[in-house]
Image (tube, helix red, strand yellow):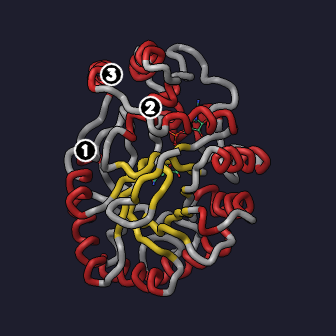
Amino acid sequence: MEFRHLGRSGMLVSEISYGNWITHGSQVEEDAADACVRAALDSGITTFDTADVYAGTRAEAVLGRALKGERREGLEIFTKVFWPTGSGRNDRGLSRKHIMESINGSLSRLQTDYVDLYQAHRYDYATPLEETMVAFADIVHSGKAHYIGVSEWKASEIRAAHALATELKISLVSSQPQYSMLWRVIEAEVVPTCEELGLGQIVWSPMAQGVLSGKYLPGQPPPAGSRATDEKSGAGFIARWLDEDVLTRVQLLKPLAEQAGLTMAQLAIAWVLQNPNVSSAIVGATRPEQVYDNVKASGVKLDADLMKAIDEIVEPITERDPGKTVSPAERP
Ligand SMILES: NC(=O)c1ccc[n+]([C@@H]2O[C@H](COP(=O)([O-])OP(=O)(O)OC[C@H]3O[C@@H](n4cnc5c(N)ncnc54)[C@H](OP(=O)(O)O)[C@@H]3O)[C@@H](O)[C@H]2O)c1
């Protein structure tokens, strides 16, 4: 496993990290969740990403149990706040009240005194940015989080938050956007802004939720046990990628992966890691074999001809519009 700095910070993270959205506390049983965390640790992954909202707060608890007993200093644990964690009108958003309550819930479920990175899961247009950043600063100054990050914020929002973070003497070090061969909306604005300000990208769904592994074949039902068959939540989220044109084009990547001596999953993860502004690719898994497959993407260099050949295949199905980086106009 290779390691990169999280943005311009001094903290190193594994360039492939493990995330537990949809899986822990929902799609998979606890023994499978545990086996995946164990496989991640065995493979040199030290960075783990979760959120208060995942599986109605159960995902943090599953991860906390799976990591119990590990040397805390050897791990980088990331969580997030914004989406609803309860039915109350204040159980959501980025108000001081909810941030202060949510961090305490996260720390208790994760069984740790601090998280390494605390992230605003989306921008909250119902709270003044100053209120949010002062709350984050108090959390950092009280030792409950070391660094602050944002997720799916626009370049202008990141710039405004960075100015306040500098004033408040806290480190805003990362942006967590969706990024894959099929979803390149950060390249035009978010990445150049983050390069200038010293933030790194921790990218989500680098495999387009499993679609870029090539296992979903056009015209065929999804493989048993895959996210597309998870009626609890996964099927709804992956549906947008299960389009015949997308699946047909993805199959054209197979010979390119074979020529490079990679599985398609490895090709997809290595592709996002070619972007030097990416600090880590957060990969999900439902089985330990997937983790062992995926981690082999660390350190892989893709040459310019291969990158060009990939571009030519996926261009018609790739989204690049920077306007697609959005947070909900109203609090959920
Ligand atoms: N900030 C945000 O708003 C946000 C949003 C979404 C995700 N995230 C973060 O990003 C993480 C990763 O997202 P993701 O799970 O969508 O990422 P992904 O890596 O694109 O997809 C992971 C899924 O693909 C399948 N898979 C993984 N490895 C495979 C392999 N080698 N071969 C075949 N299939 C494989 C597994 O699902 P099946 O086995 O079920 O098919 C796995 O759960 C999340 O856990 C979360 O931490 C953040």
Which residue is labeled 3 in the image?
306
Which residue is labeled 2 in the image?
268
Could you classify mark 1 by the number of other residues whose Cα lies within 10 Å: few (under 14), some (14-19), or many (20 or more)? Answer: some
Image quadrant where residue 194 sits? bottom left
> In the rendered structure, which disc, 2 or 3, sits on the residue that comes first in sequence?
2
Which quadrant of the figure shows ligand 1? Answer: top right
* Ligand 1 lies under 8 Å from the Cβ of mark 2: yes
Q: Give the side of residue 58 with respect to residue 212, left or right.
A: right
The dot on residue 88 is none
Report the residue at 32% width, 22% height from top.
306
- Dot 1 lies on which element? loop
Report the residue at 32% width, 42% height from top.
275
Could you classify mark 2 by the number of other residues whose Cα lies within 10 Å: few (under 14), some (14-19), or many (20 or more)? Answer: many
Mark 2 vs mark 3, foreground winner is 3
Residue 213 x/y as whole percent: 52, 27
Q: Label 2 amino acid?
A: Ala
> In the rendered structure, which disc, 3 or 1, sits on the residue that comes first in sequence?
1
Q: Give the side of residue 59 with respect to residue 80, left or right.
A: right
- Dot 3 lies on which element? helix
Is 186 situated above or below 309? Answer: below
Which residue is labeled 1 in the image?
187
Q: Label 3 amino acid?
A: Leu
Q: How far is mark 2 from mark 3, CA to CA?
A: 12 Å
Front position in the image: 254 or 273: 273
| Residue at far right of view | 31
Front position in the image: 317 or 45: 45
